[in-house]
Image: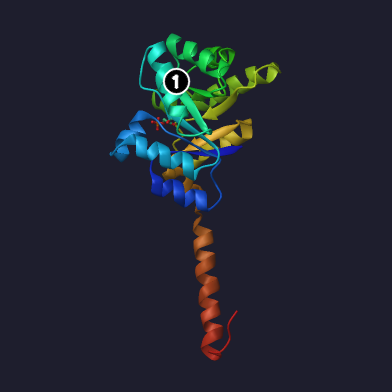
Amino acid sequence: MKIFLDTANLESIRKFNDMGLLDGITTNPSLMSKEGGNPKDAMEEITKIIKGDVSLEVVSTEYSGMMEEGKRLRQYGENVVVKVPMTPDGLKACKSLSFEGIPVNVTLIFSANQALLAAKSGAKYVSPFIGRLDDVGQNGMELIKEIKEIFDHYDYIKTQILVASVRHPLHVIDAAKIGADVVTLPPAVLDKMLQHPLTKIGLENFLADWDKLKSGNPDIEI
Ligand code: E4P
């Protein structure tokens, strides 16, 4: 399963990319707004840091605006995937951009029907928002299972399931068990996945024992 980071924060992107963990990045207007400054600078920088797919989202709501913005966003790099909302105009833009060779991520997916239609429109990715479904009392992971089951029936569907709105590490394990193609993670979730209390205690004990050995013989070194 590929791991994308769901952020426009350059420091986090560099940090996890340096560990070799990132296959791509997803952003959205809220994440851009959170960082402040000129989003163009962030977009340009992210596409340079990351080799894999970088989703950059349009803010127009009608077809021609989405097409113009999509083409402008694509100029930031060959790895740009244009993110469009799951609306009739969004699907029309998805079809046209995909036809022109520009990959599209259809976002704000909340049902299997929406995922099926986005796939029909030629989307490279569909982004079901599982955390936001959980928030309203619907099981987000059940939606991932449903979409996966449907897509697996049809060889012609090449669209990848990008699990979005992830809130905690258990979401990641469940997505991987189902066989989702990609998860996009907030930096805080990726940080939690790295840690385990026994790792911390184990390392502290190793270092304390090494210090004991060294106290008897200060000249030893690795
Ligand atoms: C996906 O690409 C979105 O940017 C994101 O996962 C939305 O998550 P949220 O529900 O935490 O805002």
Residue 86 at x, y percent in the picture: 45, 16
Q: Nearer the viewer, residue 11 or 153?
A: 11
Q: What residue is shown at x 38% (from left), y 15% (from top)?
A: 65
Residue occupying the point 55% across, 20% down: 123
Q: How is the image coloured?
A: rainbow
Percent coordinates x, y for residue 71 in the rendering:
45, 23
Instruction: Write down the residue under mark 1.
Output: 84
Name, please, the residue furthest toward the left. 37
14 sits left or right of 146 in the view: left
* Quarter location, residue 122: top right
Is 116 in front, or is 203? 116
Among the 4 quarters of the image, the one containing residue 58 = top left
Secondary structure under tag 1 reads: strand
Q: What amino acid does circle 1 point to?
A: Val
Q: Up-down: is 25 above or below 18?
A: above
In the image: residue 49, left or right of residue 29: right
Q: Position of residue 165 (x, y in %)?
A: 44, 31
Q: Is residue 22 positioned above or below 99 on the image?
A: below
Quadrant of the rendering where the N terminus is positioned: top right
Q: Nearer the viewer, residue 17 or 38?
A: 38
